[in-house]
Image: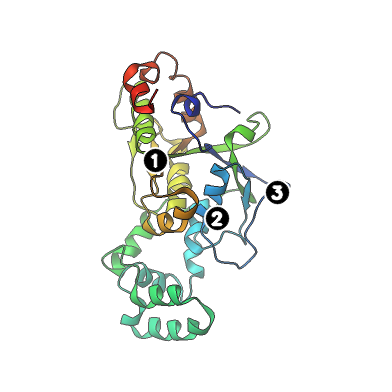
């Protein structure tokens, strides 16, 4: 499937389709079971033309399992959800159970993970606030075995169950998609920036929009860890903006006759 939007905004990377399916695509990249990894590594590869697949045993990290829609994987975090609350905030060295779990992990994890487990990522001020964050996440267990990341130009929408389209974009392209998301609406807050992991922005936080009226696009890659993880693949200038497939089709219909054909946008493209 070719995208009018992608052409009009001059994308060098591919928009990525998130597909729910019970059939594993042949030749797709996949994490090994039990192997840690960042879901956004595979997103970056899909943006460059490769297909990736995930299931309930191969989602890379606990937040990734949550983000892709495989239920509440935080319960499987070392030490359980409570240790995750400390991990994302003040660190597990600050309470007895956390210290014990951390010392037990030390021989088996990387120095970086051990440091973050004990000292905390400190993305949220308190463990109590992290608990509230998890409560507010739209955690869902999707009724399919696999989530697939596929370059949009390789997708057959007549045969595949496309759920979300996620655009990896530079700042000019991001602004263009924000304008386009509001172009044909009678409301003008059609793009949101919820806080969460990079994979959660393109996954469950966008899944949540599917049943809303009007649907909204979600800006992502506001996750510092994800940005660090993919900077070698995509550099430092990339954000994501994702939307339900239905909204994507709506916006595709707005390209012709819009600002995307006018001199201001063409000047930003350097044309």
Query: Disc 3 to disc 1, how far (Cα)?
Result: 27 Å
Residue beneath disc 3: 24
Residue 206 at what x, y percent from top left?
Answer: 44, 42
Residue 204 at what x, y percent from top left?
Answer: 46, 48
- Contact, mark 2 vs mark 1 (Cβ under 8 Å): no
186 vs 212, nearest the viewer? 186
- Contact, mark 3 vs mark 1 (Cβ under 8 Å): no
The tag earlier along the polypeptide, 3 or 2, is 3
The tag earlier along the polypeptide, 3 or 1, is 3
User: In which quadrant will I find the C terminus?
Assistant: top left
Residue 70 badge: 2
The residue at 44%/54% (across/down) is 231
Tell me how many marks there are. Answer: 3
Q: Is residue 52 above or below residue 76?
A: above
Residue 197 at what x, y percent from top left?
Answer: 41, 55
Residue beneath disc 1: 218
- Looking at the rendering, which quadrant does residue 30 occupy? bottom right
User: In which quadrant will I find the N terminus?
Assistant: top right
Query: Disc 3 to disc 2, how far (Cα)?
Result: 16 Å
Identity of the residue furthest to the top in this view: 257
Q: Is residue 149 above or below residue 254?
A: below
Specify whether residue 140 is in view: no
The residue at 40%/59% (across/down) is 225
227 vs 54, nearest the viewer? 227
Question: Element type at marker 1?
Answer: strand
The tag earlier along the polypeptide, 2 or 1, is 2
Query: Disc 2 to disc 1, how far (Cα)?
Result: 20 Å
Crowd class of label 3 (few under 14; some 14 to 19; many from 20; radius 10 Å): some
């Amino acid at each position: 499937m070719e995208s009018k939007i992608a052409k009009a905004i001059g994308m060098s990377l591919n928009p990525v389709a998130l597909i729910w399916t019970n059939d594993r695509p042949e030749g797709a990249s996949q994490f090994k079971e039990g192997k840690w990894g960042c879901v956004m590594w595979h997103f970056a590869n899909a943006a460059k033309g490769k297909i990736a697949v995930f299931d309930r045993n191969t989602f890379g990290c606990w937040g990734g399992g949550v983000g892709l829609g495989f239920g509440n994987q935080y319960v499987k975090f070392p030490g359980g959800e409570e240790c995750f609350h400390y991990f994302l905030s003040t660190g597990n060295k600050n309470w007895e159970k956390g210290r014990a779990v951390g010392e037990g992990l030390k021989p088996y994890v990387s120095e970086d993970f051990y440091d973050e487990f004990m000292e905390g990522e400190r993305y949220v001020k308190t463990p109590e606030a992290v608990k509230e964050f998890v409560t507010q996440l739209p955690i869902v267990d999707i009724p399919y075995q696999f989530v697939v990341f596929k370059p949009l130009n390789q997708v057959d929408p007549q045969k595949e169950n496309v759920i979300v389209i996620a655009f990896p974009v530079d700042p000019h392209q991001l602004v263009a998609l924000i304008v386009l998301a509001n172009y044909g609406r009678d409301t003008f807050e059609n793009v949101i920036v919820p806080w969460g992991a990079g994979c959660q922005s393109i996954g469950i936080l966008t899944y949540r929009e599917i049943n809303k009226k009007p649907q909204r696009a979600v800006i992502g890659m506001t996750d510092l860890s994800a940005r660090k993880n993919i900077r070698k693949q995509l550099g430092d200038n990339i954000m994501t903006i994702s939307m339900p497939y239905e909204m994507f089709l709506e916006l595709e219909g707005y390209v012709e006759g819009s600002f995307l054909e006018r001199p201001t946008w063409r000047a930003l493209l350097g044309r």
